[in-house]
């Protein structure tokens, strides 16, 4: 690379030299030459009269200061440097941009003929020269001028204040946002849409117009999003006491979008995947995903917009907190235990993997080259676990007190993670001094716990050791403050109250040192401990349970999450021992304890269906992979496939009975029905491996009246490689080939097919009418699933998967580097694979590293991987 991209460090934060209180933007929209006029009121903050603005891909037309042309400026690599400025002035900048050729989908671009924007993190600088940093908060007034017939709707943040016509057949609209905001929350949309309109009255009596804009013809797919939005508005008032603060809330669904959605003030832009749904096109998990993302973006209005981040290193201030809030929203509306299980699977699988990868970083990173690379599972999901631990340590009441204090202190400003923790601490009186290390330390702590029973003293001793292994970014680690939630059970299943020195103590133990011992007294017989209940901290737990103890917990633990966790530990224990057997060339053996335990769960009528479905779902591939420093991926694949087949044949009758009993004639998306379908379809996944599999799967596909059952049948056919797979895939594509969003499900199945021909099929699919290398959803579905969810084919020992990945990454490096940088993740952990694969992957990374014009998104990841 000619210019090596430079990193920024958190420690180097400096206040801006100037502030911008107001900005008036005027857009003359045109697909290839849009003219942007930005008139800002600027004030110098210190003694420096030089102003350095950010800009990227702009054509500068003019600069004026206080109405007069300004000649003291210079454009240099991403900046406009203005000198000799007065203290207070009005700065007017005219630039032009080219939305049509903006394939990176950052700044102003075109999605299916409509103009739309994405400015977080640093996309506003692709619209005009500006202080593009989150601690510069300005009031925005935006005027949009465009052709009336092609762009009947002209939208921006805030409230619409004026509109009119021009003489040449165009129209214009002016929007005013009364809330000062950083540029990353700016949005503009112009196009022709169908609009779903509704209304919400806040509890203080403000009437809010709600509008969802979708592509023409999609109106009937937007109702669930509207219901979710109203539920979110109501929930935030009830649980957090937070109300909406404008007269209008708009959501626009677009097909071309780099991520899920964006919380722009008053005008959210969404990936259509998180808006559009009906019974025929969306699965139950799509419905739940929409509810959670609609909630997430809405909740950002307070945690993100009203209080924003001082700098991008503080991203988890808004993201971790808002994920926590959306998780609570989904849990309050649906099944708490199922939500918790889903979230924990993400932490134990891909998040732990990220902690152990070359991209390892604390939830508040110290060093960043490309900010878009830090919208990670660590910042979001682990960030949310950190908030959840604070919630556990403080309790709901004190936590809400802390939230109120946080808003009292920081509303309308740009804050830091430290500000949040201080508010929690001050409001509750709980000391979080030691806890703060969670913000600065990366990696996954390991808790090694040992239990000893003393029959004479009637005491039970838990010895807890914690340790965090060095990570690529941070060789030294310290002991963290870990809340460890425990319960002890007597052999008859009753709870043994926790007492130390005769005094009752709480279930949550505070682990702060590298080794701590807890002696519980009045324990009449050897107990079975339930540890890390509710996954009270994002750590790996080691405790040598016997099969009997785990089977006991599956039946007797009072907490559903703990029962599920015991099931996962039982599976994990035997998956591990079988992987060792396979490594040594021995046969796989599954003990009776697993079969008995899972049969007990499957036939237990008192359990919620959705919960049984989770009990029967094996740990994910990334989770299993993460148990090892280095592993041949084929061993894991062999063992997991064998386990599925064994459970299928041993529990065939029980699966079949359960499957038949769960037939629902009507499709409804209440949580009870969603749970029943989940369990029915887990049964089908196992039954697919039996001799009746092909007939059952075929029958379900042919008689299905909803997408959940349709996709479940196809998934079963795909994984078990059933004869009906091809005809079903054919039939689906015939039916849905005109609809990219629905075809994504089909592309995922093609990408994750275990068939030997998977790669050549993926290549053929790239010529499918519904596929486009310009659309991130299509790329993620087809190519992302191949690289992430298809270990046997992507990691083929002939290196064909890796060469394909190289080719794709080279293309995306030019057209959409942000998507490229997401896709490359499975290659970064190459050191964890066997030596032969390591060498193949390393050569791919090296080729990228030496490539001319490597975007900084890929550069950051590739160079970290190679240095590691
Ligand atoms: N804040 C946005 C994410 C922006 C990602 C920029 N690469 C969506 C969200 O977390 O709600
Ligand atoms: Zn967010």
Image: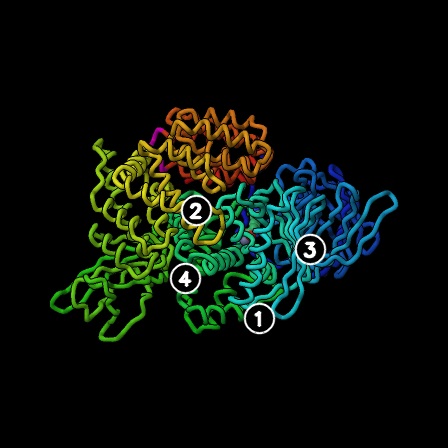
Mark 1 — residue? 408
Front position in the image: 283 or 373: 283
Q: Earlier in the sequence, mark 4 or mark 1?
A: 4
Query: What is the distance, in whole Å, between disc 3 and disc 4 at their CAs?
Result: 35 Å
Q: Percent from the top left, x then y, of residue 718?
A: 41, 32
| 492 magenta-colored | no
Mark nearest the camera among 3 and 1 is 3
Query: Which image quarter holds the N terminus?
Result: top right
For the residue carrying disc 4, how many other residues have a C-alpha within 10 Å: few (<14), some (14-19), or many (20+)? many
**Residue bearing mark 3:** 157
Is residue 84 among what the camera can see?
no
Q: Position of residue 98 (x, y in %)?
A: 71, 38
Hey, which residue is sitting farthest bottom in the picture? 503
**Dot placed on the residue nearer the N-terminal end, 3 or 2:** 3
Residue 664 numbered mark, or none: 2
Q: Residue furthest left?
A: 456
Q: Residue furthest toward the front? A: 665
Residue, disc 4? 389
Cβ–Cβ under 8 Å for marks 3 and 2: no
Residue 426 visible at all: yes
**Residue 773 left/right relative to 554:** right
Q: Position of residue 408 (x, y in %)?
A: 57, 71
Indicate which label's residue lies in the foreground, 3 or 2: 2
**Left or right: 679 as drawn, with respect to 294:** left
Q: Nearer the viewer, mark 4 or mark 2?
A: 2
Q: Decide if ligand 2 comes within 8 Å of the CB at mark 4.
A: no
Query: Mark 2 vs mark 1: which is more N-terminal?
Result: 1
Indicate the secondary structure of the residue bearing disc 3: loop
Name the residue rendered at 55%, 45% in the picture.
278
Q: For the magenta stretch, what is the residue range?
A: 832-836
């Amino acid at each position: 690379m000619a210019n090596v991209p430079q990193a920024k460090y958190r420690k180097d934060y400096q206040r801006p030299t100037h502030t911008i209180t107001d900005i008036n933007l005027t857009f003359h929209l045109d697909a290839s030459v849009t003219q942007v006029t930005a008139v800002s009121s600027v004030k110098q903050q210190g003694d420096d009269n030089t102003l350095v603005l950010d800009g990227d891909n702009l054509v500068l037309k003019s600069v004026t200061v206080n109405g007069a042309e300004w000649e003291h400026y210079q454009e240099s690599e991403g900046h406009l440097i203005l000198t000799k400025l007065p203290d207070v002035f009005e700065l007017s900048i005219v630039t032009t941009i080219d939305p049509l050729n903006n394939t990176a989908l950052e700044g102003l671009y075109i999605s299916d003929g409509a103009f739309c924007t994405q400015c977080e993190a640093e996309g506003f600088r692709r619209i005009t020269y500006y202080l593009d940093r989150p601690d510069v908060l300005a009031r925005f007034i935006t005027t949009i001028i465009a052709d009336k017939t092609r762009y009947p709707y002209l939208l921006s943040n805030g409230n619409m204040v004026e509109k009119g016509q021009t003489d040449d057949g165009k129209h214009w609209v002016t929007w005013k946002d009364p809330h000062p905001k950083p540029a990353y929350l700016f949005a503009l949309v112009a196009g022709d849409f169908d609009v779903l309109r509704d209304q919400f009255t806040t509890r203080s009596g403000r009437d809010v117009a709600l509008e969802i804009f979708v592509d023409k013809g999609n109106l009937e797919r937007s109702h669930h999003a509207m219901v979710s939005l109203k539920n979110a508005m109501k929930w935030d008032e009830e649980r957090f006491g937070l109300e909406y603060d404008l007269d209008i809330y708009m959501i626009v669904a677009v097909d071309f979008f780099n991520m899920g959605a964006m919380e722009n003030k008053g005008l959210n832009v969404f990936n259509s995947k998180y808006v559009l749904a009906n019974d025929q096109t969306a699965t139950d998990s799509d419905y739940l995903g929409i509810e959670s993302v609609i909630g997430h973006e809405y909740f950002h209005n307070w945690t993100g917009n009203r209080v924003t981040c001082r700098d991008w290193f503080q991203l988890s201030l808004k993201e971790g907190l808002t994920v926590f809030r959306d998780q609570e929203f989904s849990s309050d509306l649906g099944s708490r235990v199922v939500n918790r299980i889903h979230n924990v699977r993400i932490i134990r699988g891909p998040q732990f993997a990220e902690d152990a990868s070359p991209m390892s970083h604390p939830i508040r990173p110290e060093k960043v080259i490309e900010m878009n690379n830090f919208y990670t599972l660590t910042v979001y999901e682990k960030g949310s676990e950190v908030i959840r631990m604070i919630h556990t340590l403080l309790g709901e009441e004190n936590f809400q007190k802390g939230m109120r204090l946080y808003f009292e202190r920081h509303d309308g400003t740009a804050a830091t993670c430290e500000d949040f923790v201080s508010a929690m601490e001050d409001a509750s009186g709980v000391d979080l001094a030691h806890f703060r290390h969670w913000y600065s330390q990366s990696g996954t702590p390991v808790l090694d716990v040992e239990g000893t029973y003393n029959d004479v003293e009637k005491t039970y001793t838990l010895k807890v050791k914690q340790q965090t292994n060095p990570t690529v970014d941070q060789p030294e680690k310290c002991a963290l403050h870990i809340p460890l939630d425990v319960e002890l059970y007597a052999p008859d299943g009753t709870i043994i109250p926790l007492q130390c020195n005769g005094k009752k103590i709480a279930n949550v133990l505070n682990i702060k040192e590298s080794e701590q011992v807890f002696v519980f007294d009045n324990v009449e017989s050897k107990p079975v401990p339930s540890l890390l209940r509710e996954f009270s901290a994002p750590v790996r737990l080691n405790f040598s349970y016997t099969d009997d103890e785990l089977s006991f917990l599956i039946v007797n633990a009072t907490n559903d999450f703990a029962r599920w966790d015991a099931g996962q530990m039982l599976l994990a224990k035997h998956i591990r021992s079988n992987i060792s057997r396979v490594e040594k060339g021995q046969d796989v053996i599954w003990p009776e304890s697993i079969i008995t335990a899972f049969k007990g769960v499957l036939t237990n009528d008192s359990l919620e269906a959705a919960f049984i479905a989770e009990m029967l779902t094996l740990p994910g591939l990334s989770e299993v992979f993460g148990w090892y420093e280095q592993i041949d991926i084929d061993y894991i694949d062999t063992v997991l496939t064998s386990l599925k087949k064994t459970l299928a044949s041993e529990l065939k009758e029980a699966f079949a009975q359960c499957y038949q009993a769960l037939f629902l004639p009507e499709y409804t998306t209440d949580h009870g029905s969603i749970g029943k379908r989940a369990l029915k379809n887990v049964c089908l996944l196992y039954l697919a491996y039996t001799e009746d599999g092909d007939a059952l799967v075929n029958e379900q596909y042919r008689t299905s009246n909803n997408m959940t059952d349709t996709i479940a049948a196809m998934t079963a056919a795909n994984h078990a490689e059933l004869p009906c797979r091809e005809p079903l895939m054919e039939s689906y594509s015939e039916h849905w080939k005109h609809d990219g969003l629905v075809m994504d499900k089909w592309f995922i199945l093609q990408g994750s097919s275990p068939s030997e021909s998977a790669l050549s099929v993926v290549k053929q699919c790239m010529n499918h009418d519904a596929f486009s290398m310009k659309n991130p959803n299509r790329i993620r579905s087809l190519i992302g699933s191949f690289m992430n969810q298809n270990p046997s084919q992507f990691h083929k020992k002939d290196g064909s998967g890796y060469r394909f990945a190289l080719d794709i990454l080279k293309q995306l490096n030019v057209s959409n580097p942000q998507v490229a940088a997401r896709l490359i993740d499975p290659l970064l952990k190459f050191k964890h694979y066997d030596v032969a694969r390591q060498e193949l992957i390393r050569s791919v990374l090296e080729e990228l590293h030496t490539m001319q014009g490597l975007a900084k998104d890929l550069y950051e990841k590739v160079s970290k991987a190679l240095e590691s």
